[in-house]
Amino acid sequence: MNYQNKYTKQQIWDFLAEIPDPEIPVITIVDLGVLREVEVLSNKVIITITPTYSGCPAMKMFEDEIKKKLHTEGIENVELQMVYSPAWTTDWMSDEALEKLNKYGIAPPVKGSHDKGVLFENGPKIVQCPQCGSKNTVLKSQFGSTACKALYQCKDCLEPFDYFKCI
């Protein structure tokens, strides 16, 4: 089958934009910025992805779901390439993904920032509560429900919430 005659690069991106993150199902692999490149050749489709961090348990599922989705769409010959450079950063997340996280109850990362302040005298960053919007929050643990999240609590509404760490 000649995939170039049947599928455009945009169609492939659109197919893959339906694949949710297994840990945070309100965002997709496209929203997350994990999907880096799509190449449509005559005899195969090459998909390039970047892990959010080394050892991310979701990457195997991403790979499996990409192949499954493309097979469902009639694309049998799929090659997956994992690239590590440049390293993934939360800055690659779409604005739509940040809004989806907030609506879901996870405080999104602040674009262009990093969480190293907690290691130095700056202390933890100020994170807005996704429940009530207050900035009167406190870091409870650098380790949340998954490795990419930290646990915060709002001092106003008293609700605990996850914060998607900046990388």
Image: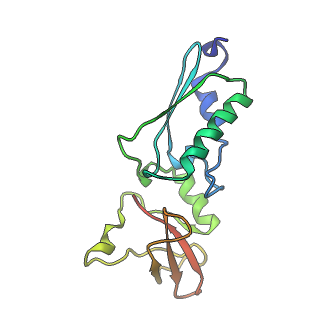
Q: Tell me the residue at 61%/69% (across/down).
A: 105
The spot of residue 42 in percent (x, y) is 58, 12
Q: How is the image coloured?
A: rainbow
The spot of residue 62 in percent (x, y) is 59, 43
The spot of residue 122 in percent (x, y) is 28, 77
Quadrant assignment for the C terminus: bottom left
Q: Is residue 115 left or right of residue 131?
A: left
Looking at the image, residue 126 lies above or below residue 5: below
Residue 26 falls in which quadrant of the image?
bottom right
- How many circles with numbers are drawn on the protein? 0
Q: Is residue 158 left or right of residue 33?
A: right
Quadrant assignment for the N terminus: top right
Residue 71 falls in which quadrant of the image?
top right
Residue 101 falls in which quadrant of the image?
bottom right
The spot of residue 123 in percent (x, y) is 32, 78
Q: Tell me the residue at 74%/30% (across/down).
A: 72
Front residue of 99 and 142? 142
Q: Tell me the residue at 57%/52% (across/down).
A: 96
Front residue of 19 and 128? 19
